[in-house]
């Protein structure tokens, strides 16, 4: 256990010591928030208003609150994974400068070395994502605030689970990388593509039926939906108080992926948590196993 603590401390210090890597990871969520608010706000607003009958009056503040919740959940769903890839660059850097070889020939156990990288990346990812969450709260405070204290706690839990998932995924992929160019290329691909396949940039409900079924197998999809449900719970409650028919509210939930369906069967929130947790445990197990096999060879 002392070895693990020392490795976590060492990896975390090196990450924050590298100002370029730290500020790049920190500024990414802010840039995404500006881009989302600039280019995606109108798309989300059209999606929201399109699900409401034309004859039904809607308060403008309620629309802004819904759009803000969508932007907020989309940003964090992407950042929990993309920031993890940025934070995990140290693993590849240690390979490039030979530090990884020095560590593997020491008595340090393979699982301790693997979990040192993993937990250090998780800590830095959580710090950055929770800072991003605070920035997003400031943003939606001015657009439409319908979030309660319990919603904040659930959102923090969602971020924690998604960061576990993103860190495990990045750790497995980074094990097979050995140059800075490779990690930069992978980071670019993940940053550009992950937002689409998890439903952050565009709701999965707007994809073709076949693609929806394919994406329903991806755990990140359910992480996005969890954030959506908790970021927009207050908005939907306000809609009910304003007299929105239940059918209209459910149609809105369907259109923005608060409701997800696995081959036409609705996936409940509890099942989404179970899928995410099982996936995290499985990925961590695979990561530690691969590390053990690599050290054995």
Image: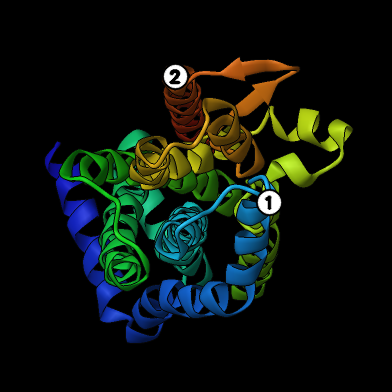
Q: Give x and y (percent) for residue 182.
A: 67, 68
For marks 1 and 2, give the CA distance.
38 Å
As helix, strand or loop, the secondary structure at mark 1 comes to: loop
Mark 1 and mark 2 residues within 8 Å of each other at the beta carbon: no
Q: Residues within 10 Å of mark 2 (few under 14, many from 20)?
A: few
**Location of residue 273 by image quarter:** top left
Q: Residues within 10 Å of mark 1 (few under 14, many from 20)?
A: few
In the rendered view, does 119 fall on the left or right side of 193?
Answer: left
Quarter occupied by the C terminus: top right
Please tell me which residue is depicted at 27% across the width and 45% down the height of the picture: 156
- The earlier-in-sequence mark between 1 and 2 is 1
The residue that label 1 is drawn on is 54
Please tell me which residue is depicted at 45% across the width and 30% down the height of the picture: 280
User: Against 256, is 60 above or below?
Assistant: below
Please tell me which residue is depicted at 55% across the width and 72% down the height of the picture: 36
Q: Give x and y (percent) for residue 121.
A: 35, 55
The residue that label 2 is drawn on is 274
Q: Nearer the viewer, mark 1 or mark 2?
A: 1
User: Against 111, is 84 above or below?
Assistant: below
Quarter occupied by the N terminus: top left
Along the viewing direction, whichever of 6 and 266 lies nearer the viewer? 266
């Amino acid at each position: 256990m002392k070895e693990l603590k020392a490795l976590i401390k060492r990896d975390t210090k090196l990450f924050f010591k590298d100002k370029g890597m730290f500020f790049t990871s920190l500024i990414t969520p802010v840039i995404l928030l500006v881009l989302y608010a600039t280019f995606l706000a109108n798309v989300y607003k059209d999606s929201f208003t399109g699900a409401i009958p034309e004859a039904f009056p809607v308060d403008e503040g309620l629309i802004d609150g819904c759009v803000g919740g969508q932007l907020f959940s989309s940003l964090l769903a992407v950042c929990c994974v993309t920031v993890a890839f940025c934070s995990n660059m140290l693993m590849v850097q240690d390979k490039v400068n030979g530090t990884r070889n020095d560590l593997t020939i020491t008595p340090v156990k393979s699982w301790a070395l693997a979990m040192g990288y993993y937990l250090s990346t998780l800590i830095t990812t959580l710090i950055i994502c929770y800072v991003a969450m605070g920035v997003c709260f400031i943003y939606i405070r001015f657009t439409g605030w319908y979030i309660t204290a319990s919603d904040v706690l659930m959102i923090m839990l969602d971020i924690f689970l998604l960061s576990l998932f993103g860190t495990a995924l990045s750790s497995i992929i980074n094990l097979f990388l050995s140059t800075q160019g490779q990690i930069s290329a992978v980071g670019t691909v993940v940053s550009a593509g992950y937002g689409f396949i998890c439903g952050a940039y565009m709701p999965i409900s707007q994809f073709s039926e076949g693609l929806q079924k394919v994406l329903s197998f991806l755990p990140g999809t359910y992480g996005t939906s969890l954030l959506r449900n908790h970021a927009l719970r207050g908005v939907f409650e306000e809609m009910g108080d304003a007299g929105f028919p239940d059918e209209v509210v459910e149609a809105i939930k369907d259109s923005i992926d608060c409701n997800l369906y696995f081959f036409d069967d609705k996936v409940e929130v509890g099942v989404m948590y179970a899928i995410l947790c099982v996936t995290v445990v499985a990925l961590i197990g695979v990561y530690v196993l691969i590390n053990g096999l690599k050290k054995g060879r």
